[in-house]
Amino acid sequence: MNNNRRVSLRKNIQNLNLSEAEEVLKSKYKYTPGKPGRPPLSPIGMFLSFTIMFLRMESYRDYHAFLEKHSFWRRTLGFKKTPDIGSFSHFLNRVGVETFEKLFTCVVQQLINEGFLNLHMVAQDGSILEGNLDDKEGGWGWDHIDEKYVYGYKIHVIVDTYTELPVTLSVTKANVHDSKEFTRLYQNIKNYKTRFPIRFYTADKAYDSSNIRKTLFRDNVTPIVKASKTRIKPRYPKKFLKKYVKRVSVERFFSRLKEFLDLKKLQVYGKNNVLIYSYIIITGMLLMGYVNHCFGYSPRSVKTFLRNFT
């Protein structure tokens, strides 16, 4: 990577206002400037470290070596010295699930403010993440793609169909029906502040529900969802079919999540840990997509970011 690109990357990361996320993180620390005690490592630097670490699919030890070698990233993350390996475990224990959820929401809101994310048209779906059979919090669910029962969890997301990046997510047992998470996720995206509110919602037949349609119509949102059970085969207008094609954006997101970011099989146990793991990786994907966008690359390309910027 040439020096101009390195400086530009740092500038783009710093231009992303993460002050609200930093305040959320600082609330988890008791240190007060000017009073006794050792100041903590940069909270936002630790948070960004996890996104970089998981995007690079590295262990704590490998990531520690990466920071030791690259002073650029140490400076960018606000570290005078490279954090020791134990600092990363302590950070996860200190922060917890609720804080990671708030951090994710802060990042999404900032990217909406920047005009990078758009809620005009969104797509929803769920996908099973295979877990370990000795994980007592998982459940059995039917994977319609591989046509077999899988033990683990299901991640539910709503994505911006343009960038194919998620704006909200949840994790359940693998046997929970996709439509059960509609209300929770839909309410989440309604809480975002945006000049361009949601106008079109698309999903597969699993979301063909009178309650879902009533909720959308009440908010002046057009459902682009095919009927699941009809006596007569429905005929859909061209405008409907053109928008329905956008539904695959959420499927492509799941494909990248599993193929490039090593989520084919979970290496963590328990719903809370799965949630934290998901928030870290997906927040990393959002920041990665934003950096790609700033340099004129596709916000969807994981490979481009890893090749050019890490």
Image (cartoon, rainbow, N blue to C red):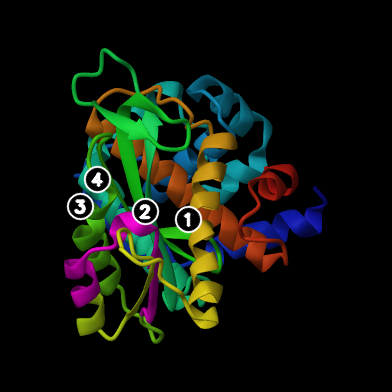
Q: Residues within 10 Å of mark 1 (few under 14, many from 20)?
A: many
Alpha-carbon span between mark 2 and mark 1: 8 Å
- Spot the residue most to the front: 232
Tags 3 and 4 in contact by the CB under 8 Å rule? yes
Residue at 67% across, 49% down: 305
Helix, strand, or loop for circle 2? strand
Q: Amino acid at mark 4?
A: His
**Residue 307 position by quadrant:** top right
Instruction: Magenta stretch: give its range.
Output: 198-215
Disc nearer the start of the sequence (2/3): 2
144 or 306: which is nearer to us?
144
Instruction: Report helix, strand or loop for mark 1.
Output: helix
Residue 216 on the magenta span: no
Residue marked by disc 1: 250
Structural crowding at the residue carrying mark 4, measured as other residues with C-alpha within 10 Å and reported as few (<14), some (14–19) or many (≥20):
some
Separation of residues labelled 3 and 4 (CA atoms):
6 Å
Name the residue tied to disc 2: 157
| Residue on which disc 4 sits | 177
Residue type, mark 1 in image: Val
SS class of the residue under badge 3? Answer: helix
